[in-house]
Image (cartoon, helix red, strand yellow):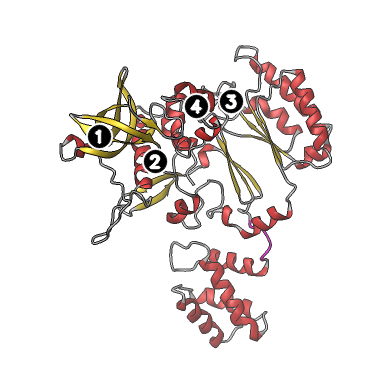
Amino acid sequence: MPGEKLINAVQSTFSLYGLVLSRKLSISLAKELLNVEENEREMWLMQVIEQVLAQNLSDTQITIENLKLAIEECIKPNALKDTETVLNVIDVFDIPRIKYELSENKFVLETVTPNLVAEAQYKSILFKDRFELLWYRTMRHELFTPPMPGERKKDWIELVPIEHLLSGSKEGNVYVMGLLSQLVEGEYYLEDTGGTIKVDLQKARFQDGLIMECSIVIANGDFKDGILHVKNLGFPPAESSSNARVDFGNANTFGGLSKFSLKLSEKLKTYEESNKDGMIVFVSEMWLDDKIVLRKFKIMLEGYSEYPPIAFVLCGHFLSFPAKPSSRQKLIEGLKNLADIIIQYPDINQTSKFIFVPAIDDIGSPKILPKLPLPKNLTEDFRKNIPGAIFATNPCRIQYCTKEIVVLRGDILTKMCRNTLYFPFQGNIHDHSSNVTYILEIQSCITNISYSRSHCNCRWI
């Protein structure tokens, strides 16, 4: 039994860091300290407190779970926790939504109840939430942040809300942020949560990127007689991951089981660096009914047989023809043939994961995003034979150690080029399509989406 002096020392040390440890837990921790040399007890106690503080506590009262995790971390510092997964495939229903909380003046995470059958009101909510996210994110950028009282900023750009223009309080050269829409055929408008103005794009200079209808843009031009004559048109500025994470600390914004961002895990980073030859192979248009495709895939497996990859991400379409009555049987036969090929390579079968991401036209669920996995009744036999089979949603997210990967199967670039207002004649088209704001915008204007799950089609941080 530990002495009263040691118990009080434990409680007082926790109190110095603003933590409240009950007497019962103090006695338990003091018992653990008895197993440590007396001259090392203070150092060991400080390590426990550091691990407790690293748990992103919501309350100063320490629970037995907090204390257990901290002690385990000190005893086995290199062991991975249950939530520290090396590879994890996250479907759309485990992805938190990011929203701006005006009362707290910061972005927060919100848990969303799974619901693919959205009511009509969600369509307007989608555009409202999207605009507000981009608006508040842009207002944090140094170019658009208003000066503090008494401060002088030379390079400050003022974003003018549309309702100010409609009230007549602002004219001349202005910067306006809004949703680009075509309310009347051949006539474009900018919309925000406060109103709508007509825009003239005849002399507009388009910045890098593929700007489409329904894109949220920043327009600079002269506002006169109720019309904004645009000189420059572009996307809001991008924000780095480090800046975007400021509001969330070490909270998990990516999705999955862990409460904390695995991107910051030192243990997973060490594991990742020790496996530098590890790789994830992506294959698109995996036609399971095509003998040539299966033969080529077998050649690929043959090449990887001595060094199995971490995972194969196999994306649809999984059939070479549009859906019809025979599609179900063809898919079952194709999965059986694929399983027969994989079984021929035992090391790959036992070590590698096979992640299936359906295309929007694959059978099993409506042609909207997010799309559900292939039906279980079609994949049951494949799962039995291939232990590493994972049938994911489209889009889905893959976490490998500290890497965060978003997989969205869709012919997005082609549709973007087809719908862009201005096609760039210089540079690589892929560079123009890589603007971060596309990640949120492209789906609603060129692809059918579920309005209540629109946040699943984007990646902010």
* Residue 229: quarter of image: top left
Please tell me whether mark 1 sits on a helix, a strand or a loop.
Answer: strand
Sequence order check, earlier mark of 4 and 1: 1
How many neighbours does mark 1 have within 10 angstroms: few (below 14), some (14-19), or many (20 or more)? some
**Disc 3 to disc 1, how far (Cα)?**
44 Å
* Residue at the spot of label 3: 359
Magenta span of residues: 77-81
Residue 199, image x, y percentages: 28, 28
Q: Amino acid at mark 4?
A: Phe
Q: Is residue 126 magenta?
A: no
From the image, give the main secondary structure of the stretch colored magenta: loop
**Secondary element at image label 2:** loop
Residue marked by disc 1: 222
Return the residue at label 4: 425
Which element carries disc 4, helix, strand or loop?
loop
Could you tell me the amino acid type at mark 3? Ala
